[in-house]
């Protein structure tokens, strides 16, 4: 059995730089118009926090696992913004989006603190009497 491989070159579309720049400028103007008229709707962002990426929107609570220097209630500014978008557009960073302003939110919201079981009372373990360690 022989395998045949295609050696036909892939056709590429030649893009006119003037038309591409014009289309780009039109898109940017439409996005800026939506933002200036406050018609973009609910915004979302993908941010990089503590080695992980989170998709967030206004009012979200983000749980960060492991060591995290800020205390509960501290206001923070997220600087590593990878992507910002709305229903009609998405701004993608290369690698990050610069000069993005986001209203600081609380880091942690505690809904309930509960202790179940007895404190400092280990569970009874049976079956170890005959074991030799």
Image (cartoon, rainbow, N blue to C red):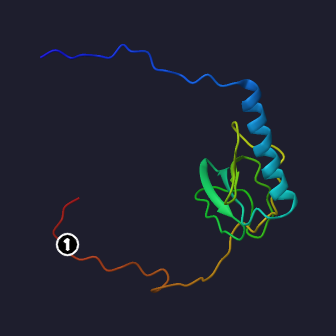
Residue 23, horizontal then vertical, whole percent = 74, 38
Residue 45, placed above or below residue 60: above
Give the total of numbered labels.
1
102 vs 113, nearest the viewer: 102
Residue 67, placed above or below residue 58: above
Please report the residue visible at 67 percent of the width from the left and 52 percent of the height from the top: 47
Q: On the picture, is 12 further left or further right than 35?
A: left
**Residue that carries the numbered disc 1 in the rendered image:** 129
Residue 13, horizontal then vertical, whole percent = 57, 24
25 vs 128, nearest the viewer: 25
Q: Residues within 10 Å of mark 1 (few under 14, many from 20)?
A: few
Placement of the N terminus among the 4 image quadrants = top left
As drawn, which residue projects farthest toward the right?
36
As drawn, which residue projects farthest toward the left?
1
Residue 129, horizontal then vertical, whole percent = 20, 72
- Label 1: state its secondary structure: loop
75 vs 29, nearest the viewer: 29
8 vs 60, nearest the viewer: 8
**Residue 133: quarter of image:** bottom left
Residue 110, placed above or below residue 86: below
Please report the residue visible at 61 percent of the width from the left and 64 percent of the height from the top: 63
Q: On the picture, is 99 further left or further right than 48?
A: right
Please report the residue visible at 63 percent of the width from the left and 81 percent of the height from the top: 111
Please report the residue visible at 65 percent of the width from the left and 25 percent of the height from the top: 15
């Amino acid at each position: 059995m022989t395998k045949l491989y295609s050696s036909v070159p892939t056709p590429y579309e030649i893009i006119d730089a003037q038309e591409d720049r014009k289309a780009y400028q039109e898109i940017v103007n439409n996005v800026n118009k939506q933002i200036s008229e406050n018609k973009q709707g609910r915004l979302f962002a993908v941010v990089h926090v503590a080695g992980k990426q989170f998709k967030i929107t206004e009012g979200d609570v983000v749980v960060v696992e492991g060591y995290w220097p800020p205390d509960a209630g501290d206001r923070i500014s997220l600087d590593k913004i990878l992507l910002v978008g709305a229903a009609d557009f998405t701004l993608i960073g290369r690698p990050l989006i610069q000069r993005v302003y986001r209203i600081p939110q609380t880091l942690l919201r505690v809904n309930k603190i509960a202790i179940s079981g007895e404190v400092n009372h280990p569970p009874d373990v049976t079956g170890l009497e005959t074991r030799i360690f």
